[in-house]
Amino acid sequence: MTPPADPAAMPAPPPPRGRPEALFPLFADAVKLPGIGPRLQKLLEKLTGPKVVDLLWHLPTGLIDRRNRPHIIDAQPGVIATMEVVIGPHRAPPRGSRAPYRVPCTDETGEIILTFFHAREDYLRRTLPEGETRVISGEVEVYGGQVQMTHPDHVLTLDEAAALPPYEPVYPLTAGLSGKVLAKAIKAALERVPELPEWMDAAWARQQNFPPWHQAVARVHEPTDLTGIEPRDPARSRLAYDEMLANQLALALVRARMKRSRGRPLAGDGRLRRKVEEALPFDLTRGQRIAIAEIEADLKEPYRMLRLLQGDVGSGKTMVALMAMLVAVEAGAQAALMAPTEILARQHAQTLAPLCEAAGIRMAVLTGRDKGKAREAIVAAAEAGEIDILVGTHALFQGSVAFKDLAVAVVDEQHRFGVRERMELSSKGVAGTDVLVMTATPIPRTLQLTAYGDMDVSRLTEKPAGRKPIATRALPLERMGEVTAGLGRAIAGGRQVYWVCPLVEESDVLDVAAAEDRYAGLKATLGARVGLVHGRMKGPEREEVMSAFQAGDIDVLVATTVIEVGVDVPNASIMVIEHAERFGLAQLHQLRGRVGRGTADSSCLLLYKTPLGDMAKKRIATLRDTEDGFVIAEEDLILRGAGEVLGTRQSGLPQFRLASLEAHADLIAAARDDVELILNRDPELESERGQALRTLLYLFERDEAIRYLRAG
């Protein structure tokens, strides 16, 4: 690997140029668009986002066909029809009556009644003046033998009707915001779309049949036929490619910045690593040794490491991380390991403590629970260099935490953190910290490119010796009585059990209610030694239950998916997942990985509601057929889509508005290749295309990446 140029020799960058003026109208507040105003601002913000540009990225999910223009006599019930009619005398209901307001209309073939509930008479008389011709459009119904239309979608003059498109886009909505209001705001947003310089390679655009950017934005909101809402429509594909290109370019700039950030060569003498390896009750796997060698090679380089360590549940990532941290300690520096939860941080510390003790390494734990003098003592010791390895949670990010010489930072369960957090952690080091991030969620290649394109990757594909296969069975919920009876026998034989409750409509409150119901039921059936953990419990309360389960004082732990990641209880050998059909494959695999960690034979029972849909059948069959997390992750991406593979509640995955990792997987790889060519030719984006690409980064709000260009 050729080291990059020394940043110290580079000229100081001029001040950043900031967002191009052409984009100002798109980044104005959407509240200023017609029909929005302060009353609807919050609803719009929740649905699309606060800026005009957010409305452009809010794509239609369906189309209403307005081309059917029958006479009244030919109108079919249940079908959308657009008709030219003459307005008859209004039939207003008596005051205080709940009866609907009716307006009869005619053409030369018959009569149709327009029906309105909770109507305002003055508004209807203005909109539907008696004796005048109007064009109405909406769903035709027959009620009591009479053709009618309830609350027409459109009532237009002949001039206005000329502009009615043959296909009308249908947008996702939120309660309180009507389709008409949203469509009007989007139309106004489209009028503000500027002409922008072309950032796409011309030959590639021609080959893909991509329209220019300005046209593509208009076309996705004004489709001329039903293919216009398909993900592979040329206009949609063009915008998806733009979004992926911005994503890949931003990640490549972060990576380039890391690569030219001054680091320092770290090469310990191996004495501590040898002591730890001698203290291990097992041999390192071949995969672990390869990963350790890759990390050691990175650490020897004079610039910063940024590496992702992917390993399936139980593949031994913590040992690899410890070996990486020991290189820093052997070189006289410090290391830190950060986990997303207090339970995980303390569990890592528990795993590492005996090995650190055997090698004479000073280790400490710092989480949000540590307060007052105890916390002050740990912070002071870290700053004085009296701690070699500090394990903790987000608390390690806080300004009050300083290190004497932080050389290696390990971030566990990286998919819960974004790019910004790992940059923050690495900035704690004085001379540039090397960063290793780990995940137990096997990541398909397409996701790897979008979420971790700024990193080198090591994979652990084997499980350490002694790990037993897990027998996986699927049973209908109707057999729950048999399952609980079987659990009673297993508990009597000294076994411990996880019982995971279903996801309920992505709602924490409902998830907790489901878990509490199951907890009460199992407690009544199996006796008092049943515990409950869920995400709404306070940290210390949850930890108390987890500790009791780890100590064997609880036989059955009822939980929401809060136990998905990292919890290690070797004696727990049975996993029951209720309503398994509601979970994704990768999530089921993660949950299953909580068992099979001890000496007992382990099993995973998937309880499902009948009848099973095709997708759920495929998921359960895949889980029964393999324990390979990487195979499972690829299958999950195909079955469920990218937003679900790492879980919708995680924050590290980039949220694509236009691109679909399933529909546009080939475009991600193309964008990656394109970025490589661009930065080889024009690393500072100073050419004409480079300037246009800067605009693209601002358009997709990847402003952070622009700061990493030396030219500002």
Image (cartoon, rainbow, N blue to C red):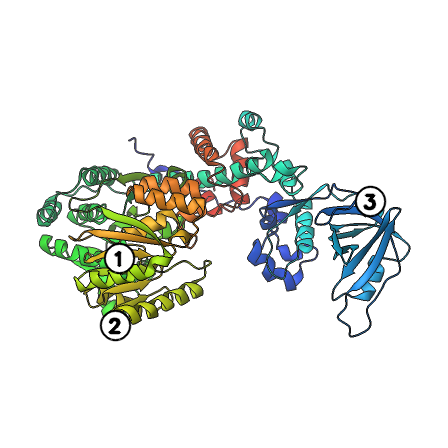
Residue 657: tell me if it is visible: yes
Measured as percent of width and height from the top left, residue 179 is found at 66, 54
- 373 in relation to 564, above or below: below
Q: Please give the residue where the numbered disc 3 appears in the rendered image.
A: 71
Q: Please give the residue where the numbered disc 2 appears in the rendered image.
A: 528
Report the Cα–Cα distance between label 3 and label 2.
Answer: 72 Å
Measured as percent of width and height from the top left, residue 317 is found at 23, 47
Q: Earlier in the sequence, mark 1 or mark 3?
A: 3
Q: Residue at x 19, y 60 (%)?
A: 495
Report the Cα–Cα distance between label 1 and label 2.
Answer: 23 Å
Report the Cα–Cα distance between label 1 and label 3.
Answer: 68 Å
> Dot 2, crowdedness within 10 Å: few (<14), some or many (≥20)?
few
Give the label, 1 or 3, closer to the camera.
Answer: 3
Q: Nearer the viewer, residue 483 or 519?
A: 483
Q: Nearer the viewer, residue 134 or 351?
A: 134
Name the side, left or right, on which 469 lies relative to 56.
Answer: left
